[in-house]
Amino acid sequence: MTVTQTPYTPFFLALGSLGLETDPGGMLSRWKNCGEDLRYLVNSPVTNCRLNDLFASSWEGLQRRDFEPVLGRSLGHICARRGDEPIGFVNLAWDGGIHAFVLDTTVHPNVRRRGVGRGLVKLAVEVARKRGVKRVDSDYFSEA
């Protein structure tokens, strides 16, 4: 599949190795191994309010912020949703060339340890590959 859309255009990538499958509309993926209705949406519209609520549930003391400028410069972003509610998010930043970075990986505490974060990151890597990126990095930090 060749992806030619702009970074804000939603699209779907099938990832059979992740246990993801396409829906008839081809715009989302569903996690087969989870007993929930969990969808992964690539570059889907998401409000600042929803993202800030998700991040606040995961990161104590987080300052609310405007995600729009960041997402506007990103190679893409993936949002895991249960119904209409975002329960996971990852941003795919890039240098404008062949190098990308997985940033802001967040999963709601109530659905952790179920593979949601892994699905987000694997899908982000696939999005990067489809857009010509040769290297994807990720960092982590731990509060002591």
Image (tube, grey):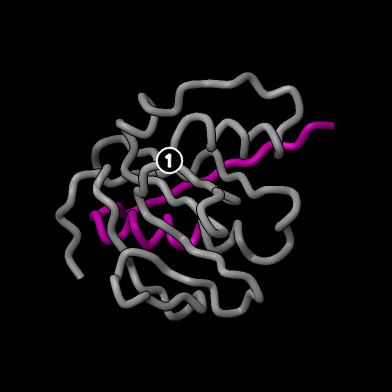
Q: Is residue 64 above or below residue 52?
A: above
Residue under the image location 50 percent in, 46 percent down: 90
127 inside magenta stretch: yes
Q: Residue at x 63, y 74 (%)?
A: 34
What quarter of the picture does the N terminus occupy? bottom left
Q: Is residue 100 left or right of residue 60?
A: left
Relative to residue 98, is residue 20 drawn left or right?
A: right
Query: Which image quarter is the C terminus in?
Result: top right
- On the image, numbered disc 1 is attached to which residue? 46
Neighbours of disc 1 within 10 Å: few (<14), some (14-19), many (20+)? some
Q: Is residue 114 left or right of residue 90?
A: right
* Bounds of the magenta segment: 121-144
Measured as percent of width and height from the top left, residue 89 is found at 53, 47
26 versus 138 height, above or below: below
Q: Position of residue 91 (x, y in %)?
A: 45, 42
- x and y percentages locating residue 62 in the rendered image: 67, 24
Q: Is residue 69 magenta?
A: no
Disc 1 element? loop
The residue type indicated by label 1 comes to Val
Along the viewing direction, whichever of 102 and 56 lies nearer the viewer: 56
Q: Quadrant of residue 96?
A: top left
In this view, the residue farthest toward the right is: 144
